[in-house]
């Protein structure tokens, strides 16, 4: 079976002219050993992500999209293959604090105010007091949470909490932002608004974003590149370039071009038997 | 108008509603107690009741006013307590406050040592998997030894090497109260979610930073629950520590001498004092907890 479409040849030239991709996965395989025998979470994954790209990983539960993101973040270790982040091993990249990670849940610490939550990584990384305050204020403003600095997480809505967690991930200004279904638990109206805010943020900061989602419209709306994944074993089915202008509005989702890309994503998922159980 | 409805009944009414159930229970207990005094004290009282001519009035008058009753009537305990607390010089052994302080100081010292030991053990156990396997069974086993069996040994052994006074009693308190702290803190320090721990990992935070910024704040609710248990049994530990030595001072000593000389009223007054002190200690921990929660913005 040759369902795996490799993306070894760079289809889009790296924006800043940097030869090494931000993320380079070659033959990445990850197997969990469980009581019921091995689980093949990732099988021969090849993927290159260039600087400044917004890449979505999409697929059904168990396709390994979160595992791939966690492997990039050095929260899981591949059992085979090579994986580099900015030319470093994921472990080295983590030790150098080169990425910000946004989890499925806000994971804010309830005993800290919103501002103190944003300062958490800065405290750990040894920024000065003044710098901590300055960066917290700036990043909370960036996610439209100015004025909520002194609130506790439980005083915020789910969407606001997730925005605070994005501000926290951005606070130490990593070049790479890893997001694991950050809006999965939110309702569609809040999600639309956060998608728009995330796009603006990405345009303004020029960060490289790897974004895990199981929503086709969300993936097409946000991404410059969509990676379609399939389960058992977790693998890449298709890599779709999504070259819409970076300035995007919600109305774009009704255009034929948008629907064509969405259709191709759905076809990819179908080819990977993602709709069967 | 709607505001009045939303804010519920006035505070005085609510206080009244809270007080009624408590008052009823207290009233029932007192009633049963006074009734029980009559048959329980019959052994010592019957002769005098008969001498006074018998009858209900004489039965009650005698049964509730004996010098050395089997069960003293509640008002006898209260009067004795009042005299021992408010009518005696608190710097002399005549005062119950003097004895309460002797026991309390030793209990608090033991409590402080026990909390410290408990927290240190919990931190060690959480950070070293081997300790969890090797140390925890011993910690659990230590609590299966009856404290009454080893308390005299601790006092006697330490006394023979010249360690007397507050320390041996405090050690017994410590021995009793480190356990709930260790168990509660192991649970508390491991209570953060995987995501909260992963977050620390993505920042490349050290174990010390993870402990200080995540594990310890997350463990506070568990710590306070443990502290309430620990502070009460620290007091028990000190009282028990006073029993086997023939100590001259302390609530335990009062209970012991009271039982030697049949002074049941004195025993009950000491008991009342012990429970008031224990209640005050638990209340104090609760107040510190409430203050901490306010400081940490815990949702009410």
Image: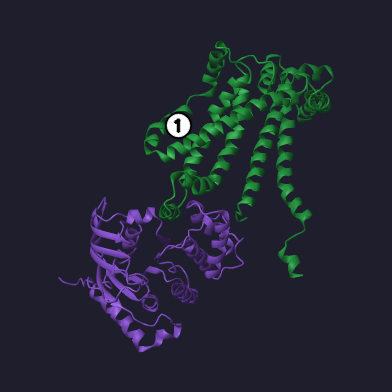
Q: Secondary structure at mark 1?
A: helix
Can residue A145 be seen here? The reply is yes
- The chain letter under disc 1 is B
Give B99 or B274, whichever is nearer the viewer.
B99
Q: Is residue B30 left or right of residue A111?
A: right
Q: Residues within 10 Å of mark 1 (few under 14, many from 20)?
A: few
Q: Is residue B194 left or right of residue B98?
A: left
Q: Which chain is green?
A: B
Residue B107: percent from left, percent from top: 63, 28
Q: Residue at x 30, y 56 (%)?
A: A89
Q: Is residue A144 above or below residue B127?
A: below
Can you name the residue that lies furthest to the front here?
A17
Q: Is residue A103 left or right of residue A64?
A: right
Q: Which chain is purple?
A: A
Q: Is residue B255 above or below residue A5?
A: above
Residue B179: percent from left, percent from top: 51, 33
Q: Which quarter of the figure is the N terminus of chain A placed in?
A: bottom left
Can residue B41 be seen here? The reply is no
Q: Residue at x 48, y 24 (%)?
A: B145
Give B211 or B100, whichever is nearer the viewer.
B211
Residue B248: percent from left, percent from top: 69, 15
Q: Which quarter of the figure is the C terminus of chain A placed in?
A: bottom left
- In which quadrant of the rendered view does residue A27 lie? bottom left
Q: Is residue B275 above or below residue B165?
A: below
- The residue that disc 1 covers is B140
- In which quadrant of the rendered view does residue B97 lie? top right
Q: Residue at x 26, y 66 (%)?
A: A231
């Amino acid at each position: 079976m040759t369902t795996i479409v490799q993306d070894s040849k760079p289809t889009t030239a790296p924006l800043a002219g940097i030869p090494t991709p931000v993320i380079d996965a070659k033959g990445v395989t990850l197997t969990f050993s469980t009581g019921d025998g091995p689980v093949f979470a990732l099988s021969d994954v090849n993927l290159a992500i260039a600087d400044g790209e917004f890449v979505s990983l999409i697929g059904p539960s168990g396709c390994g999209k979160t595992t791939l993101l966690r492997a990039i973040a050095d929260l899981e270790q591949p059992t085979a293959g090579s994986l580099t982040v900015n030319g470093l091993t994921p472990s080295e990249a983590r030790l150098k604090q080169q990425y910000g990670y946004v989890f499925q849940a806000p994971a804010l610490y309830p005993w800290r105010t919103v501002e103190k939550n944003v300062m958490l990584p800065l405290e750990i990384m040894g920024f000065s007091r003044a710098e901590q305050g300055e960066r917290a204020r700036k990043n909370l403003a960036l996610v439209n949470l100015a004025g909520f600095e002194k609130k506790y997480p439980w005083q915020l809505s789910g969407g606001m909490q997730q925005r605070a967690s994005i501000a926290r991930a951005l606070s130490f200004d990593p070049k790479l932002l890893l997001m694991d279904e950050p809006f999965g638990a939110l309702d569609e109206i809040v999600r639309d608004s956060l998608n728009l805010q995330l796009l603006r943020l990405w345009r303004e900061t020029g960060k490289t974003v790897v974004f895990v989602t199981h929503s086709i419209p969300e993936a097409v709306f946000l991404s410059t590149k969509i990676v379609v994944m399939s389960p058992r074993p977790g693998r890449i089915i298709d890599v779709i370039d999504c070259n819409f202008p970076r300035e995007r509005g919600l109305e774009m989702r009704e255009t034929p071009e948008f629907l064509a890309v969405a259709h191709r994503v759905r076809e990819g998922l179908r080819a990977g038997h993602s709709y069967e159980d | 108008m709607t505001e009045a409805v939303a804010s519920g009944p006035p505070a005085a009414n609510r206080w009244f509603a809270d007080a009624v159930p408590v008052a009823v229970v207290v009233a029932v207990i007192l009633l049963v107690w006074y009734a029980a005094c009559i048959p329980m004290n019959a052994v010592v009282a019957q002769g005098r009741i008969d001498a006074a001519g018998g009858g209900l009035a004489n039965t009650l008058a005698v049964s509730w006013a004996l010098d050395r009753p089997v069960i003293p009537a509640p008002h006898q305990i209260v009067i004795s307590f009042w005299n021992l607390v408010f009518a005696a010089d608190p710097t002399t052994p005549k005062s119950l406050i003097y004895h309460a302080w002797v026991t309390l100081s030793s209990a608090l010292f033991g409590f402080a040592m026990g909390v410290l030991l408990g927290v240190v053990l919990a931190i060690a156990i959480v950070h070293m998997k081997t300790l969890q396997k090797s140390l925890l069974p011993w910690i659990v086993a230590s609590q299966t030894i009856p404290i009454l069996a080893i308390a005299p040994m601790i006092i006697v052994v330490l006394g023979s090497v010249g360690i007397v006074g507050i320390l041996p009693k405090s050690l017994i308190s410590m021995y009793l109260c480190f356990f709930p702290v260790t168990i509660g803190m192991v649970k508390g320090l491991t209570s953060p979610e995987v995501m909260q721990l992963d977050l620390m990992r993505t920042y490349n935070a050290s174990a010390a930073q993870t402990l200080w910024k995540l594990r310890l704040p997350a463990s506070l609710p568990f710590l306070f629950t443990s502290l309430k248990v620990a502070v009460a049994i620290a007091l028990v530990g000190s009282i028990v520590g006073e029993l086997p030595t023939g100590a001259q001072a302390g609530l335990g000593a009062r209970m012991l001498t009271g039982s030697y000389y049949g002074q049941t009223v004195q025993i009950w007054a000491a008991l009342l004092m012990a429970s008031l002190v224990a209640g005050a200690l638990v209340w104090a921990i609760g107040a510190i907890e409430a203050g901490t929660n306010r400081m940490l913005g815990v949702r009410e």
